[in-house]
Amino acid sequence: MKLWCKSEEISGFLDQGTSITGELQFSNTLRIDGNFHGSISSSDKLIIGEHAVIHADIKVGDIEVHGQIFGNLEVKRRTEIFQTGKLRGDVQTSVLVIHAGAVLDGRSRSEEH
């Protein structure tokens, strides 16, 4: 399944109303708008939609946070928390962007190259 969003190819999508528990690994770009409990890992991009509630430790290449995450992030390149985004946990990343209105309840640490 391939979806397009903001001129960016999304190779996977978990819609609102979906609830999954377990270990998630993916390639390319994945968008989650549902609920997820467990762990998520990829070297690619994860988009957390506005309605998503994620209880997981996450290791990805890039992440956009529009919804809620409860857990720690380890991001190789760029972490962006948008106005509707809430992160309750620590983040380790190369680039951290926090928009006005976003919530980061935890510590941030820059990853050195």
Image (spheres, helix red, strand yellow):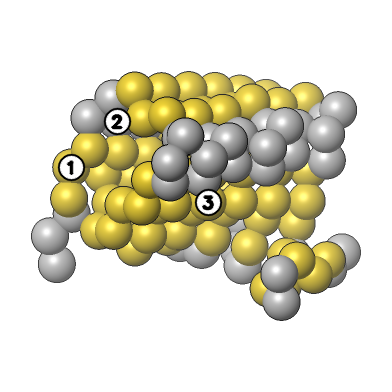
Of 98 and 13, nearer the camera is 98
Contact? badges 1 and 2 (CB < 8 Å): yes
> Which image quarter: residue 88?
top left
What residue is at 78 percent from the left and 43 percent from the top?
14
Pointer 3 local density, CA inside 10 Å: few below 14, some 14–19, many at least 20: some
Of 72 and 67, nearer the camera is 67
Q: Which mark is residue 64?
A: 3
Q: Which mark is residue 109?
A: 1
Q: Is residue 112 left or right of residue 96?
A: left
- Numbered disc 2: secondary structure: loop
Q: Point out residue 72 in the picture as x, y percentages from the top left corner.
A: 37, 31
Furthest residue in direction bottom, as rendered: 7
What residue is at 26 percent from the left and 44 percent from the top?
92
Distance between the Cα atoms at labels 3 and 1?
Answer: 17 Å
Q: Amino acid at mark 3?
A: Glu
* Above or below 8: residue 37: above
Of 100 and 96, nearer the camera is 100
Q: Is residue 108 left or right of residue 37?
A: left
Task: For residue 59, say whether it is visible.
Answer: no
- Numbered disc 1: secondary structure: strand
Q: Earlier in the sequence, mark 3 or mark 1?
A: 3
- Numbered disc 3: secondary structure: strand
Residue matched to label 2: 90
